[in-house]
């Protein structure tokens, strides 16, 4: 079986390899700071995160299919070129493009459902890392049953006046904008009364309270709205039809949470760590029980990569509905990533229990941090239990889960 990409892609592969050689050795220098303040260093030169993003867009290594008029590269979607870019960047150990809720979730939603004015106003600064977004979906009493949300929006004198609360709002403390679900039709059925509204985070009446999670970092936030007022035109889609817009965004979110190429990069980091760590003078990579487990995880990730290409190919070339496939990706991807990070913690023995500032910490504590982080993502973006219910009912045609009747 010939697994090469084919002669038509060889020139592109060489181009990407040359680019990677030019930039080999650059690293994050401010990874603990906000997304916009992260920098790279290369040969004594500091490069802003947004500058690196612009370079990648201009080369067509990210935002490849986003039209030029909205700040993208303006090319065609090509899953083989995307795979070549991901593989060569991983091999060269250079940083990939920025992602996040704005780039991965809002931009494709705007391209599909936004007005021309909204596309021109928001897509370019979002792609370039100049505008960071957060997602205002969950509420204290509306998590898995998101359509029960109660944050209220009233249209008064050409403005939306919003009151209520959101929770589990990732990156809210760093963001300039929020895409938010708001109940604007109180008398409509719960799925029919929601609108999808864009809110500047510096709007008066908006309060952010960080929440420290099990990674020991403030990964989430509570956000409170007290007469927060935004223009009527800050709505995506029609009034009261935000549930459909929200589901379009959720479809993109599930894919963004579990990038298979990033997972394979993590496998490569695990291999490097196993070559360095020893027990009684023997490298972990040379201990059969550890090596067997590594190979099993590597095989799962390879299958996960291949399935993601199949899903993307179906979406691009055949226009198929891939919503259920995206849920499967999210379910498998988050649990697989948690398994991978947990295996790394296990093989390091007592070193795997270290955290934060220990002098013996390996890889900056990233294995411990991400083990807890991905445990959270098994819940976030739709819990594994909810994903399984939807996959079984809508994908496999199984009976709906029985509802417990109240007294």
Image: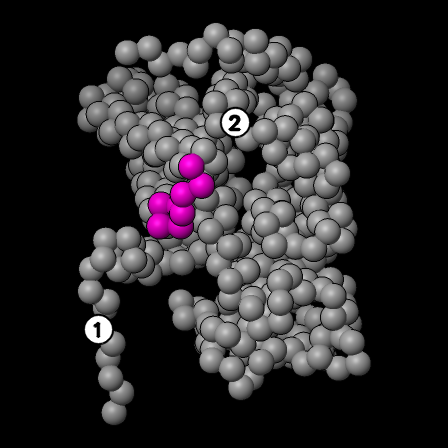
The disc placed on residue 402 is 1
Q: Is residue 286 left or right of residue 175?
A: left
- x then y, percent, for residue 12: 57, 13
SS assignment at label 1? loop
**Residue 407, quarter of picture:** bottom left
Distance Cα–Cα, label 2 vs label 1: 43 Å
Residue sitting at x 24%, y 79%: 404
Q: Is residue 304 above or below residue 147?
A: above
**Direction from residue 113 to residue 44 in the image, left or right:** right
Instruction: Look at discs 2 and 1 and give the one toward the viewer.
Output: 2
Tag 2–tag 1 contact (CB < 8 Å)? no
Residue 124's disc is none
- In the picture, residue 114 is in which quadrant? bottom right
**Residue at the extreme right:** 157
Q: Please give the residue where the numbered disc 2 appears in the rendered image.
A: 78
The answer to whether residue 322 is above or below residue 16 is below
Q: Is residue 38 visible?
A: no
Queried whether the magenta region covers residue 8, the answer comes back as no
Q: Give, as a single range, the part of the protein colored magenta.
A: 318-326
Could you say whether the residue bearing mark 2 is in a helix, strand or loop? loop
Q: Is residue 305 visible?
A: yes
Residue at 52% across / 27% down in the picture? 78
């Amino acid at each position: 079986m010939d697994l090469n990409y084919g002669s038509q892609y060889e020139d592109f592969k060489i181009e990407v390899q040359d680019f990677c050689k030019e930039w080999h050795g650059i690293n994050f220098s401010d990874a603990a700071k906000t997304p916009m303040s992260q920098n790279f260093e290369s040969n004594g030169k500091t490069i802003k995160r947004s500058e690196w993003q612009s370079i990648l867009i201009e080369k067509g290594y990210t935002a490849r299919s986003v039209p030029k008029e909205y700040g993208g590269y303006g090319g065609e979607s090509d899953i083989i070129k995307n795979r070549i870019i991901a593989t060569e960047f991983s091999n060269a150990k250079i940083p990939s493009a920025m992602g996040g809720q704005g780039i991965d979730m809002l931009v494709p939603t705007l391209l599909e459902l936004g007005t021309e004015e909204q596309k021109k106003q928001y897509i370019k600064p979002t792609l370039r890392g100049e505008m960071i977004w957060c997602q205002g979906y969950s509420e204290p009493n509306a998590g898995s049953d998101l359509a029960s949300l109660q944050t209220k929006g009233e249209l008064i004198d050409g403005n939306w006046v919003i009151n209520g609360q959101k929770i589990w709002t990732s990156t809210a403390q760093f963001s300039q904008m929020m895409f938010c679900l708001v109940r604007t039709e109180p008398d409509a059925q719960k799925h029919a009364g929601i609108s999808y509204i864009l809110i500047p985070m510096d709007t008066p009446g908006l309060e952010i309270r960080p929440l420290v999670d099990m990674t020991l970092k403030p990964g989430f936030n509570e956000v409170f709205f007290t007469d927060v007022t935004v223009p009527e035109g800050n709505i995506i889609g029609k009034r009261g039809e935000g549930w459909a817009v929200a589901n379009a965004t959720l479809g993109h979110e599930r894919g963004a949470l579990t990038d298979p190429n990033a997972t394979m990069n993590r496998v490569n980091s695990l291999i490097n760590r196993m070559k360095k760590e020893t027990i009684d003078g023997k490298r972990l990579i040379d201990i059969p029980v550890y090596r067997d487990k590594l190979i099993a995880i590597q095989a799962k990730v390879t299958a996960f990569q291949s399935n993601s290409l199949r899903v993307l190919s179906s979406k691009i070339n055949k226009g198929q509905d891939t919503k259920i496939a995206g849920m499967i990706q999210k379910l498998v991807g988050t649990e697989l990533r948690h398994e991978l990070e947990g295996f790394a913690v296990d093989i390091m023995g007592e070193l795997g229990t270290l955290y934060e500032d220990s002098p013996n910490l390996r890889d900056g504590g990233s294995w411990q941090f991400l083990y807890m982080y991905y445990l959270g993502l098994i819940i976030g973006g739709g819990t594994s239990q909810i994903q399984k219910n939807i996959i079984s009912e809508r994908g496999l045609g199984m009976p709906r889960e029985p509802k417990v009747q109240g007294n």
